[in-house]
Image: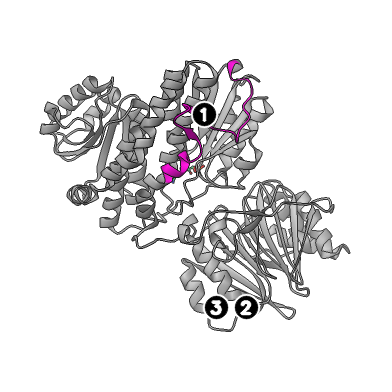
């Protein structure tokens, strides 16, 4: 998705902005641009492709000035090209924008009738034109910006410069934007990793906030021009956490970080001796009244929700409905005030998941977000939030976010089970003991990386993969297949293993590897029968199991044995070989693992 950075201070802005932009590359983009103000003139440069191309042109000392903006664009309106790249300039106003202006066509037609000339196909370009239009009517710059924002329908994070004034304005509505507070200088960014090497003091802007940075001072107003106050927050993420630390890719680093990430997720929350889970951070309503739990998310986070359905229903006996966030609100879901709506998101900024949370709120449900990013919209706007504490996840393919989400879901089940008197202290102690062992068990799987890499080499030229699993391993294989397809561009489909006979079996021959995840759980025997059916059709099986002694384990093409654990936690262990398998195949194929084509880290448009 698009990225915004801005600087206002006493140092040269160009290098600072380009470096910050590079730190946002992980979000995915197709073009980049920069605007620097210097003594009443704004220099703008834009390039299709990587930030590096832009850097070569602007970081030669010619782009001088101590206030500026830069942007990476992920095309929504208009093809990726230099003319559609941001910043966009109209008259003496320059704008960078994340989000979508839904009524841009109507505004554009109105402005065209007034004689304004448009140079791009973007929705963004109406913004500087509208500002100019209001200034032509006699408004000052700040009021013209406010009036413009009032006319925009849709979402925006904005950075705005004006040629004849040393001023930077930033504003947000439904698209993330933060202000970093330095020593006599300010930064703006759409995501903390962009500027975490500069400061760890942030203001997380809220909808309709407008920031005015001028003469090294910061002023915050709302869309009506009233002064607003926002707390300065210190984030714990360090710069080193947002760097690769010797790994070839962020994704690999993040896979290997999982034991540590899960330990951090558990930290301060498990009280083993007391047999208690501490979630002081949330004040859930009366749990006994909950009629239904909704779990809504997108992508990987949705797969964590599907696991949540198994975990909650099996243990709490409360019905759970899972939904893909982009579908949820359009079917007018029947939510009651006694329902609990859990939204799960790494970024906390996924537009569809935010919309799902709003739908739940509107219908009176208690909304709880499970989220990784402090200050994000879902963290702020839900009635309660549980942070996963996975640390920054930079690779577009989600890895440690998933395993920490499953860990939180498991702890939440224990927490609620205790409140409902379904689980006693002893049950909880037993479960705590099991989840405490997960980081170590995961570590032993990660040590199998060289053999997984070998297997990846063997299968890297296959064109299609089928992933099969039952019960709680069905979402696990969905997630495994998603990992493979998003980073290697190989077609991979996942099915509940029982569905194989209802169609996918027709695909099976010696050319298509079938990845089975089948630990020795209640569905084991059934899945073993499915494996028999595959071998009978000369299908090649890659099996992930905790049972190396089973007859089937000796007959498969490739075997990965993971440690055993309880049913609810097994997906965390099964996931590690799936992540590594996908990673190594993509690495062999030479794809852009951390920024796969067409994908964005945080999908802030619907
Ligand atoms: O930030 P979120 O967890 O809300 O993101 C949801 C999806 O966009 C995300 O999981 C996506 O599917 C990843 N690329 C998966 O690896």
| Lower sequence index among marks 2 and 3 | 2
SS class, disc 3: helix
Asked if 174 appears above or below 216 in the picture, the reply is above
Q: Are marks 3 and 1 in contact (CB under 8 Å)?
A: no
Label 3 vs label 1, nearer the camera = 1
Note whether residue 532 is visible. yes
Q: Which residues are magenta?
A: 261-288
* Residue 476 as seen in the image, left or right of residue 552: right
Who's the residue at 34% across and 36% down the image? 437
Q: Label 2: which residue?
A: 12
Q: Label 1: which residue?
A: 295
Measuring from the top left, give residue 240's x and y in whole percent.
Answer: 46, 61
Indicate the quadrant where residue 403 lies: top left
Mark 3: C-beta under 8 Å from nearest atom of ligand 1: no
Q: Residues within 10 Å of mark 2 (few under 14, many from 20)?
A: some
Does residue 281 show up magenta in the picture? yes
In terms of depth relative to the viewer, which is nearer, 493 or 548?
A: 548
SS class, disc 1: strand
Does residue 12 show up magenta in the picture? no
Distance in Å between CA atoms under marks 3 and 1? 47 Å
Spot the residue most to the right. Answer: 138
Distance in Å between CA atoms under marks 2 and 1? 47 Å
In terms of depth relative to the viewer, which is nearer, 541 or 220?
A: 220
Mark 2: C-beta under 8 Å from nearest atom of ligand 1: no
Q: Label 3: which residue?
A: 58
């Amino acid at each position: 998705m698009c990225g915004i950075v801005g600087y206002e201070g006493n140092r040269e802005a160009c290098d600072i902005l380009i470096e910050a932009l590079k730190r946002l590359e992980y979000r995915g983009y197709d073009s980049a641009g920069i605007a620097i103000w210097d003594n009443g003139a704004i220099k703008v440069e834009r390039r299709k492709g990587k930030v590096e191309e832009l850097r070569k042109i602007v970081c030669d000392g010619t782009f001088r000035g101590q206030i500026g903006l830069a942007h990476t664009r992920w095309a929504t309106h208009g093809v990726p090209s230099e003319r559609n790249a941001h910043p966009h300039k109209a008259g003496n106003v320059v704008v960078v924008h994340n989000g979508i202006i839904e009524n841009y066509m109507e505004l554009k037609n109105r402005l065209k009738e007034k004689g304004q000339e448009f140079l791009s196909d973007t929705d963004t370009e109406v913004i500087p034109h509208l500002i100019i239009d209001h200034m032509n009517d006699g408004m000052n710059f700040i009021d013209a910006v406010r009036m413009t924002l009032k006319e925009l329908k849709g979402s925006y994070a904005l950075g705005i410069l004006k040629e004849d004034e040393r001023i930077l304005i930033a504003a947000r509505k439904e698209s993330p934007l933060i202000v970093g507070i330095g020593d006599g200088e300010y930064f703006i960014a759409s995501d903390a990793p962009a500027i975490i090497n500069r400061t760890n003091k942030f203001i997380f802007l809220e909808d309709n906030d407008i920031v005015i940075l001028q003469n090294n001072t910061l002023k915050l107003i709302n869309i009506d021009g009233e002064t607003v106050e926002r707390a300065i927050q210190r984030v714990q993420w360090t710069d080193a956490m947002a760097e690769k630390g010797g790994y070839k890719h962020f994704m690999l680093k993040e896979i290997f970080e999982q034991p540590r990430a899960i330990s951090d997720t558990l930290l301060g929350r498990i009280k083993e001796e007391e047999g208690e889970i501490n979630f002081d951070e949330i004040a859930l309503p009366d749990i006994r009244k909950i009629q239904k739990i909704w779990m809504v998310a997108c992508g990987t986070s949705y797969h964590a929700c599907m696991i949540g359905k198994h975990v909650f229903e099996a243990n709490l006996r409360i019905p759970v409905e899972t939904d893909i966030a982009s579908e949820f609100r359009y079917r007018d879901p029947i939510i009651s005030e006694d329902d609990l709506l859990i939204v799960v998101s790494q970024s906390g900024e996924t537009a569809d998941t935010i919309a799902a949370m709003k739908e739940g709120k509107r219908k009176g449900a208690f909304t709880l977000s499970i989220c990784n990013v402090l200050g994000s919209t879902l963290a702020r706007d839900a009635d309660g939030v549980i942070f996963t504490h996975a640390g920054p996840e930079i690779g577009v393919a989600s890895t440690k976010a998933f395993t920490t989400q499953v860990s939180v879901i498991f702890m939440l089940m224990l927490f609620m089970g205790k409140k409902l008197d379904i689980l006693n202290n002893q049950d909880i102690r037993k479960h705590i003991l099991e989840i405490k062992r997960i980081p170590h068990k995961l570590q032993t799987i990660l040590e199998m990386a060289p053999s997984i890499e070998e297997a990846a080499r063997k299968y890297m030229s296959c064109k299609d993969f089928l992933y099969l699993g039952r019960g709680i391993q069905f979402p696990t294989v969905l997630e495994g297949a998603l990992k493979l397809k998003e980073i290697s561009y190989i077609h991979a489909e996942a099915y509940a293993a029982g569905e194989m006979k209802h169609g996918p079996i027709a695909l099976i021959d010696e050319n298509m590897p079938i990845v089975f995840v089948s630990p020795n759980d209640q569905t084991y025997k059934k899945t073993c029968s499915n494996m028999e059916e595959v071998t009978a059709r000369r299908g090649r099986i890659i099996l992930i199991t905790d049972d190396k002694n089973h007859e089937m384990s000796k007959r498969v093409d490739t075997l990965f044995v993971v440690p055993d654990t309880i049913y609810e936690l097994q997906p965390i262990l099964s996931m590690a070989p799936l992540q590594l398998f996908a990673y190594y195949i993509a690495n062999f194929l030479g794809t852009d693992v951390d920024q796969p084509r067409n994908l964005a880290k945080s999908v802030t448009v619907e």
